[in-house]
Image (cartoon, rainbow, N blue to C red):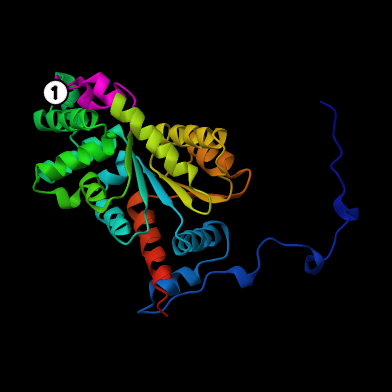
Amino acid sequence: MANIAPLDFSKLSTYSLFSRPSKVGIDSFARPLGPGASLRDFIKSLPDQLLGHDFPELVERLARAHENKKSIIIGMGAHVIKVGLNPVIIDLMRRGIVTGLALNGAGIVHDTELALAGKTSEDVAAVIGDGSFGAAKETGETVNQGIGFAAENKLGIGAGLGQYLLDHDFPYNRMSLLANARELGVPLTVHVAMGTDIVHIHPAADGAAIGAAGHLDFRIFSALVANLSGGAYLNTGSAVLLPEVFLKALTVARNLGYKVNEFTTANFDFIRQYRPMTNVVARPVAAGGKGYNITGHHELMIPLLAAALIDRISGEE
C-alpha cells in the first residue's frame, strides 16, 4: 500500500468563539434548589433546554386552554391505568381540566377489574401455557354485559359500561375512570380492535353490540375532536390504536367542514414510536398549533404534569 502523507493542519481557518452563534449558554442552565422548594420553584429551575423548555411550555399551553374553556382530551392506553394513575386522572376530571377521555379495549378491562375487585393485571407468563390467560369469569361477564347494555340503550361503550358499573354499585367504583366519567358527565369513548382484548374470547361477547356501541363512540370522539381548536389532545401510552383513531377523527371533522387547526398535542410514553410521533405530534398540527413528545415513565411524568398544571391554574404565588 502506498504511503499517505498526513494532512497539515497548520493553515486551518479559525474564527472567534466569542463571535460564533451557540445553542447553549449559561443563562439557560438549571438552578439548584434548596430545602423546602415548591413545585413552582422546581419548574422554574429547569434548564431551558429540550424537555426542560418543552415541559413548562406545554403546561402553559394547557393552562391557557383550560382558562379559555377549551377542550383537553386524553387518549389513554391501559398501561396508564396499570401503573396506578386513575386517581390522578379522576382528579383532573373533577377539577374540570380534563374534558374528555378515550380508552382502548384493554383500558376498560383493567378499569372494570379495578371497579369489581380493587386489583387488576394478571401474570400472563404464568398462565399463558395452560390456556387460562384472560379467562376471569367476572371480567368477561361484566364488560360484555355492560357493552350489551350500551348497545340496547343506544349508548357508546364508555357511557354504557360506566352506567352499568354505577347501576351495580361495585365496591371500588370510586377508582374507576368509567364510573367517574359517567357520574361527572365527562365524555369517555372506547375504541377496540376485535380480538385484541381478553373479553372477546368470553361466551358473553356480542360482536354486533361491540360494533354498534364502538362505532357510536368513534362518532362521539370525532365530535370532540371537531371542537378541539384552542384546546389540546394528549396521547398517553397508546402506540398504535389511539393515534390512528385520533388521526381518522381529525380528518373526518375537517372533511365535514370543521376548522380544527390551532391546538396543542402531546405524546407521553417511555419510548418514541412512529405512529404517536407522526399521527399525534407532527401531522395534526402542521396547519397550526404545536406538538410535543414527552419521553419518560408514565408513573412519574403524568403526575408531574397534573401537579404542575394544577399549580399553574391555581395562580398561587
Question: Which residue is pictured at 8% across the width and 48% down the height?
Answer: 171
Within the image, what quadrant is residue 140 found in? top left
- Which residue in the structure is indicated by mark 1? 132
Residue 160 x/y as whole percent: 22, 37
Which corner quadrant of the image does residue 200 belong to?
top left
Q: Residue at x 16, y 39 (%)?
A: 164
Left or right? Give the position of 90 relative to 285.
left
Q: Residue at the right extreme?
A: 11
User: Left of 208 or right of it: where is 41?
Assistant: right
For the image, the number of numbered tags is 1
- What x and y, as percent, mark residue 40? 43, 72
Asked whether residue 120 appears in the rendered view, the answer is no
**Front one among 147 and 79:** 147
- What secondary structure is marked by label 1? loop
Residue situated in front as seen by the camera: 5 or 255: 255
Q: Quadrant of residue 210?
A: top left
Could you tell me if residue 14 is visible in this image?
A: yes
The front one of 166 and 279 is: 166
Is residue 197 shown in magenta?
A: yes
Please name the residue shown 16% across and 21% down the image. Answer: 202
Horizontally, residue 109 falls left or right of residue 30, namely left
Query: Looking at the picture, how far across and down is residue 112, in whole percent?
Result: 18, 39
Image spot of residue 201 (x, y percent): 20, 20
**Numbered range of the magenta stretch:** 191-211
Callout 1 amino acid: Ser
Q: Nearer the viewer, residue 47 or 92?
A: 92
Is 290 magenta? The answer is no
On-image quarter of the N terminus? top right
Q: At 20% across and 46% down in the image, what residue appears?
A: 179
